[in-house]
Amino acid sequence: MNTSTLTDVGSVEVRERDRPVPADNELLVQVGACGVCMTDYHMYHGSFAAETPLVLGHESAGTVAEVGEDVTGYETGDRVAINPTIPCNACTYCKRGETHLCENNTSIGGAADSVIDGAFAEYVRVPQTNVEAIGDMSFERAALAEPLACCLHGLDQVDCDPGDSVAIIGAGPIGLLLLQVFRSVGAAPVIVSELDETRREIASELGADAVIDPEDTDDPVTAIQTAAGGPVDVGVEAIGLVPTIEQANAVTAKGGSTLIFGVPDQDDTLEISPFDVFFDEVGYQGSYSLTTEDFERAVILLENGRIEADPLITDRISLEDLPTAFDRMENGDGLKHVVIPDSK
């Protein structure tokens, strides 16, 4: 089979490998689509360490091509979405349902202490516990289940009731999914701040109550709060930069929550005032990865049309074109790039 393999920092090669053989409790899935994520981008550039050679790709869906001897409930030909996080199901975190914090997590093509080959390939091995049936849903749409599940997890990290106001800083693929997730629970108004005009237009089409161009104002914080009718209950940072994290916190009201969703550089530091945290009761809340439950809910929402996916998919590329996607991401060009392994 063909794979797009990370061979070193900044180097990806299309390589031929033997087709994997599933273990007794595993499925072999023929990959129909795999989204390119900022995690892949960071691993490609070395800001997330990865042992090479390694096949990346963790936002995927496809067709079951082979089943292990002990697999029940799935058979050849079934169409599935793949949850890339493999928990141990034995540690304290797993026992209380926090599988994303598992002490022994393994990731299929993503960032973790233990990483196995992912889905930028024609086939990938997956434990039967890590798939969800998708029926007739397109593979491209189903590949968004993983990032959507991460957004659902982020929603669970903050107290957001119907009528609570939300500001989202950044309208990339994740910001646009977060916009839809917060709207789905009745958040209002939802304000989106984004530099790119096309992304602002998509945010408006997806239901943002107001969109802000931070370069079109002397004070983005004031502009966001004016559009929201005051400080917001939840300030969300979906980029991963210290200045925008500070901005998200600055727009958050007393008693509210600032959600750090974008992935900051591992060496970044943030200066905060402990007194302000104490006196204003504004909490910083992180959101990392997804739980098994989050993934199941994401597939259900996509299956039932609650999430608009098509506007987020910018282009479909082959395994050979993966470096081009990374170049486009570096320049902020487009939204979700999707690898179709059997395309030429």
Image (cartoon, rainbow, N blue to C red):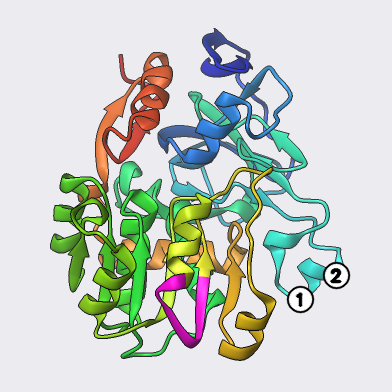
Q: Residue at x 68, y 60 (%)?
A: 100
Q: Are marks 1 and 2 in contact (CB under 8 Å)?
A: yes
In the rendered image, residue 227, in percent from the top left (x then y), is placed at 21, 76
Task: Tell whether 318 sits left or right of 102.
Answer: left
| Residue denoted by label 2 | 92
Chief secondary structure of the magenta portion: strand
In what element is the residue under mark 1?
Answer: loop
Question: Which amino acid, by three-letter code, is at mark 1?
Answer: Arg
Pick the quarter of the image with the C terminus: top left
In the picture shown, does residue 12 fall above or below 197? above
Q: Is residue 256 magenta?
A: yes
Toward the viewer: 96 or 289?
289
Name the disc covering residue 164, or none.
Answer: none
Which quarter of the picture shows residue 342?
top left
In what element is the residue under mark 2?
Answer: helix
In the rendered image, residue 98, in percent from the top left (x then y), is placed at 70, 69
Please indicate, yes or no, whether residue 297 appears anywhere in the rendered image: no
In the rendered image, residue 127, in percent from the top left (x then y), is placed at 66, 46
In the picture shown, does residue 323 fall above or below 192? above
In the rendered image, residue 308, in percent from the top left (x then y), is placed at 24, 59
| Residue denoted by label 1 | 96
Residue neighbourhood size for the residue with mark 2, other residues' Cα within 10 Å, grouped as few (<14), some (14–19), many (≥20): few
What is the span of residues highlighted in magenta in the rendered image? Answer: 250-258
Q: Is residue 26 magenta?
A: no
Question: Which amino acid, by three-letter code, is at mark 2?
Answer: Thr
Q: Residue at x 35, y 43 (%)?
A: 139
In the picture shown, does residue 218 fall above or below 4? below
Q: Residue at x 18, y 70 (%)?
A: 210
Please indicate, yes or no, whether residue 114 appears anywhere in the rendered image: yes
